[in-house]
Every structure is written in structure tokens, then in C-alpha cells.
Image (cartoon, rainbow, N blue to C red):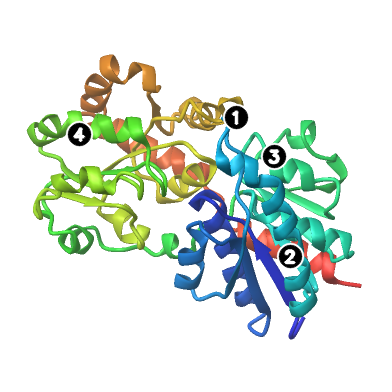
């Protein structure tokens, strides 16, 4: 495997970027000499997150289709043609032995051209309902690594490999809770509520936290609030340097998770996978604006396993305070949630994906 060259592509959101980085880390762990190159969209967050993780990245002039008529939609055909040409040049220069896609529109052009050039390829699908890009690529790649059972309704069954979702390795590091709280300026003897609405942010969750600041204070909870890049300018005024910390993005989630006593989160596939490993009491607020309402299905699977709470957005006004108080006042319930979360955790997904890459690379 020495000196093999592998392209990894996926982006747009953390849900596609961080699995790609986790796969890259696993590849470097197994084959220290492997040459890795990421490919993403030139104006999206992967252009910052991937270099921050220590990897090279090339940007394509590509963007996804909007649900309404916009200038971006009118430019899409031109961007697609240009990004396909850019992908051809990247492949011509880098000469990869293998290509990996983790979803998002950025992975479409490079994986398509790679398969046209007969470069062995694999895609990884995080969700129970696949995105458009991975659906399109499914017939062209050699293998499809998935996190959920029953994906044969979307993909060729002969290509499916159940691996789970690859998660960031630093989340497995056990960080001291007291020191983690102190690092945010919190009182280490008081509980912390961590809010994560995704890398870009969740409008309704942010509105909820804003409305409930006094309620959390009366409940003696400190707030660690990742409001997302889109909303930081609006909510940073609540950061007071003592019991409320507001961040657009939290780089070291292992410290944030260690500081947390209770977590509020969206229910994207990557978030669910990470939180099962973290095994802290969670209240899921799934986004209702996703295909097939798959976040609700993700959260419901944990509710049925008695591992977490779920409150739908439409029920927040009437249910949130009651459900939150019931949870924080019941130590036995919190303990059971954590234990049942641990049972659902999959810690070796990235290694399983590398196993599949190795198999496909073996003559």
C-alpha cells in the first residue's frame, strides 16, 4: 500500500466534511505513506476545516441546487461543466489510485470523472435517506458504505457494506469535566447545557435558547451555545464571560462534550453517531426541513432504545420546559440514557471503511 494516492471528496456541511476527515485519519493510521488529496467546493466550509485538520484540498467552482429560482440555480449548468473540467485536471495531475466520496454536491463532479476514468471508487452515506449526489453516484462506484440497515431500497444491494458513520477520533479522548468547564470560564460545580445545532446553525433552536436564558439561569444551568456561523453575529451578545459562552463553531468538541452535563442537538446522522459515543443525556430537536424527515427517524430510533429524549419543533413552546425539568431532576433516568447510548455506539466505522478500500485496492 506504500505510496498509494487517494482522493477524498465531500463537503458543504460538517455532516459530510468530518466523516471525510475521519476516513483520512484512519487511512493515515493504517498507511502512513499514503498520499491524500481532498476536493471540495471552493466557497464552502471544507476549504477551512480540511486544512485545519492537516490535509491539502482543491476547490471546485460548484454549488448545489436551491429549492427556489435563484441566480445560483441559473449558473448551475455552467458551474457543473467547469467543475467537471476542473475535476479532470485534478485527476490528471494527482493520478489517484482510489476515490472516496462522503456526499454533498462537491463530491459529485470528482467522483463522476473518477468513475469515468475507471478509478476504483467508494461512497459513504451517513443518513437513513441518501442525498441526491450519492444516489447519482451509486451505480458508478464499486462499494457503498452505509450507517443504517434497509438501505437496499435506495442502493444496489450487492454494493452495500454496513460500517456505521466515521467519527472524529478526538471524541474518544476522555477529557476531565472540571478542567473542561474551567476552560470555558464556567463554575466547575454547576451543570452545563451544551447546544449544538450543526456547523451552520439551527434557527429554531437558537430562538429557543434565547427565549429560555432566564429559565436556564433559574435552573442553575450554565450555557455552552454553538449557534452556528450563520447566526453568530446575532447571538454573540449573550456571551457574558461567566455562565454563558456563545461560539459560532467549536473546534475541539471533545472538551465541549466533556464539559456538558446535558446536550441539546439536531438529529443529523453524524450528530447521532457522535452523541452515542459521548453517552451524555441528550434532548434531540430534529430538523423538519430534511428529506423524508430522516432526522426525526434518527432520533426516534434512540427514543425507542430509551437512550434519549426527542421534542419536535412544533412542540417546543408547550413541552420544552416540562421535559427539561423532568430530565434534570431524575438522576436515574440520566444514568439509563447514558448507558443505553453507549450500547448503540459504533467506534470502528472509519477502520471498516478503510478495510473496504483495502479490499478494492487488492489485485
Q: Could you tell which of marks 1 and 3 lies nearer the N-terminus?
A: 3
- Residue at the spot 67% in from the left edge and 55% down from the top edge: 107
- Quadrant that contains the C terminus: bottom right
Residue at numbered disc 4: 210
The residue at which mark 3 appears reads as 132
**Label 4 vs 3, first from the N-terminus:** 3
Distance in Å between CA atoms under marks 4 and 3: 34 Å
Tell me the residue at 84%/59% (across/down). Answer: 115
Task: Return the disc, 4 or 2, that comes first in the chain's sequence.
Answer: 2
| First-in-chain label (3 vs 2) | 2
Residue that carries the numbered disc 1 in the rendered image: 291
Asked whether the beta carbons under mark 1 and mark 4 sit within 8 Å of each other, the answer is: no
Q: CA distance from mark 1 to mark 3?
A: 10 Å
Q: Is residue 130 visible?
A: yes
Calculate the distance from the C-alpha at mark 1 to the C-alpha at mark 4: 28 Å
Left or right relative to 143: residue 237: left
Q: Secondary structure at mark 2?
A: helix
User: Is there a contact, CB below 8 Å, between mark 2 and mark 1?
Assistant: no
Closest to the camera, between mark 3 and mark 2, is: 2
> Observer-nearest residue: 112 or 239?
112
Which residue is the site of mark 2? 87
Dot 1 or dot 4: first in sequence order is: 4
Q: Position of residue 266 (x, y in %)?
A: 42, 37
Residue at image location 35% in from the left, 46% down from the top:
230
- How packed mark 1 is, by other alpha carbons closer than 10 Å (few <14, some 14-19, many 20 or more), is few
Quarter of the view holding residue 111: bottom right
**Earlier-in-chain disc, 2 versus 1:** 2
Q: Position of residue 353 (x, y in %)?
A: 69, 59
Query: At numbered mark 1, what does the secondary structure look like: helix, strand or loop?
Result: helix
Amino acid at each position: 500500500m506504500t505510496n498509494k494516492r487517494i482522493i477524498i471528496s465531500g463537503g458543504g456541511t460538517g455532516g459530510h466534511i468530518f466523516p471525510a476527515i475521519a476516513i483520512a485519519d484512519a487511512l493515515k493510521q493504517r498507511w502512513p505513506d499514503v498520499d491524500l488529496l481532498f476536493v471540495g467546493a471552493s466557497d464552502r466550509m471544507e476549504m477551512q476545516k480540511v486544512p485545519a485538520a492537516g490535509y491539502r484540498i482543491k476547490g471546485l467552482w460548484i454549488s448545489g441546487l436551491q429549492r427556489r429560482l435563484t441566480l445560483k440555480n441559473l449558473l448551475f449548468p455552467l458551474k457543473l461543466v467547469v467543475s467537471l473540467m476542473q475535476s479532470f485536471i485534478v485527476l490528471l495531475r494527482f493520478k489517484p489510485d482510489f476515490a472516496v466520496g462522503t456526499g454533498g454536491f462537491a463530491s459529485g463532479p470528482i467522483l463522476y470523472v473518477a468513475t469515468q476514468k475507471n478509478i476504483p471508487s467508494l461512497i459513504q452515506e451517513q443518513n437513513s435517506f441518501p442525498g441526491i449526489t450519492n444516489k447519482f453516484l451509486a451505480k458508478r462506484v464499486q462499494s457503498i458504505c452505509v450507517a443504517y440497515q434497509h438501505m437496499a431500497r435506495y442502493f444496489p444491494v450487492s454494493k452495500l457494506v454496513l460500517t456505521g458513520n466515521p467519527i472524529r477520533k478526538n471524541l474518544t479522548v476522555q477529557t476531565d469535566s472540571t478542567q473542561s468547564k474551567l476552560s470555558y470560564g464556567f463554575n466547575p460545580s454547576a451543570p452545563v447545557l451544551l447546544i449544538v445545532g450543526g456547523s451552520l446553525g439551527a434557527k429554531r433552536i437558537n430562538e429557543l435558547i434565547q427565549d429560555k436564558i432566564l429559565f436556564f439561569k433559574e435552573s442553575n444551568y450554565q450555557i455552552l451555545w454553538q449557534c452556528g456561523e450563520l447566526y453568530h453575529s446575532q447571538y454573540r451578545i449573550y456571551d457574558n464571560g461567566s455562565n454563558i459562552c456563545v461560539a459560532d463553531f467549536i473546534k475541539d468538541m471533545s472538551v465541549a462534550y466533556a464539559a456538558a452535563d446535558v446536550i441539546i442537538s439536531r438529529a443529523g446522522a453524524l450528530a447521532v453517531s457522535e452523541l452515542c459515543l459521548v453517552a451524555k443525556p441528550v434532548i434531540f430537536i430534529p430538523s423538519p426541513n430534511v428529506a423524508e424527515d430522516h432526522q426525526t427517524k434518527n432520533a426516534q430510533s434512540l427514543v425507542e432504545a430509551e437512550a434519549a429524549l426527542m421534542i419536535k419543533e412544533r412542540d417546543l413552546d408547550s413541552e420544552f420546559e416540562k421535559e427539561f425539568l423532568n430530565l434534570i431532576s431524575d438522576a436515574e433516568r440520566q444514568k439509563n440514557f447514558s448507558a443505553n447510548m453507549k450500547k448503540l455506539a459504533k467506534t470502528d466505522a472509519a477502520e471498516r471503511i478503510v478495510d473496504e478500500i483495502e479490499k478494492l485496492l487488492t489485485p
